[in-house]
Image (cartoon, helix red, strand yellow):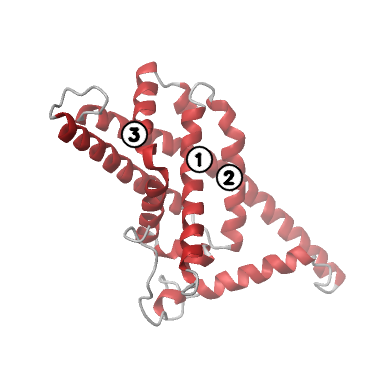
Amino acid sequence: MDIMKRLTEADKEILRRSWAIVSKEKEPLACNIFQMIFELAPDAKLMFSFMINERKDDPAKSKSEFSFHALRFLQIIESTILYLETPEELDGLLLNLGKLHARHEEQLGFRPHYWGVFKECTLFHFRKAIRADRNGRERKFSTRANKKGMDSRETDSAIILWREILTDIVDRMIVGLAANGLIRKANKDMREHRDSQDGSASASTISGHHDKSIKQICHSLRRAELSVIVPEYFMRRKSDAPSLNEDSI
């Protein structure tokens, strides 16, 4: 977390003030960010069963699962505020998240560029929340001198700072992703070599079979026959089924 170690007291104050504003309504904010990710990277939906399996009989459950996953994204960001003074304590968390996504990359089709989409969506909704807060205060107090809000200069400063923070978060997760990816590849090569020596694949474990079934499902959703880019799931989808969106969150 090199960037966080170089933050000045003025930087930290802006980050804390902006977070105090955007986190007033965490669930709506998290859901809006999450929904925008799926709008800009629709193929990311294939990582989440609740995004592709309609639950017409229990829409509340789909909404609950959506909110749960959305809030997990926001909790990672919140951790940077909690550890502004001791950012090195975040290294283990972010490296482990990167390793987790290495498994998601293999099993669920995670793509590293999703993190870039996450960053841009977060910045968009942070600015939107800060602006809404300022406009609300101006209407209430009929003055721009209200010190509790953030003016346009401070808002721009906050977005610049958050971009660096989010970039640092992603960079640390990429380190974990790459490290675990190499380990998983080495383990896979060893298993394949062992199986070839045994003359069969019977040495696979139950968890190995489970991983394979997950990968088969995800790969079937992502296979490309009608398009070399667009996953088959989207090309063959029968209709635009009702889905979670900002209006329903």
Q: Nearer the viewer, mark 1 or mark 2?
A: 1
Question: Relative to 72, is 226 on the left or the right?
Answer: left
User: Local crowd at mark 2 within 10 Å, few (<14), some, or many (≥20)?
Assistant: some
Residue at the (39%, 38%) spot, across then down? 23
What number is the disc on residue 21?
3
Mark-to-mark CA distance, 1 and 3: 17 Å
- Residue in view at x 66 percent, y 71 percent: 213
Residue that carries the numbered disc 2 in the rendered image: 97
Q: Earlier in the sequence, mark 1 or mark 2?
A: 1
Tell whether label 3 touches label 2 (CB within 8 Å): no
Q: Is disc 3 placed on a helix, strand or loop?
A: helix
Residue 14 placement: quadrant: top left
Res. 50 visible in picture = yes
The reply to whether the C-beta atoms of the residues labelled 1 and 2 are less than 8 Å apart is: yes
Figure check: 196 above or below 81:
below
Q: Which residue is mark 1?
A: 76
Q: In front: mark 2 or mark 3?
A: 3
Query: Disc 3 marks which amino acid?
Result: Ile
Q: Which mark is residue 205?
A: none
Q: Amino acid at mark 2?
A: Leu
Q: Can residue 192 be seen from the camera position used here?
A: no
The foreground one among 187 and 89 is: 89
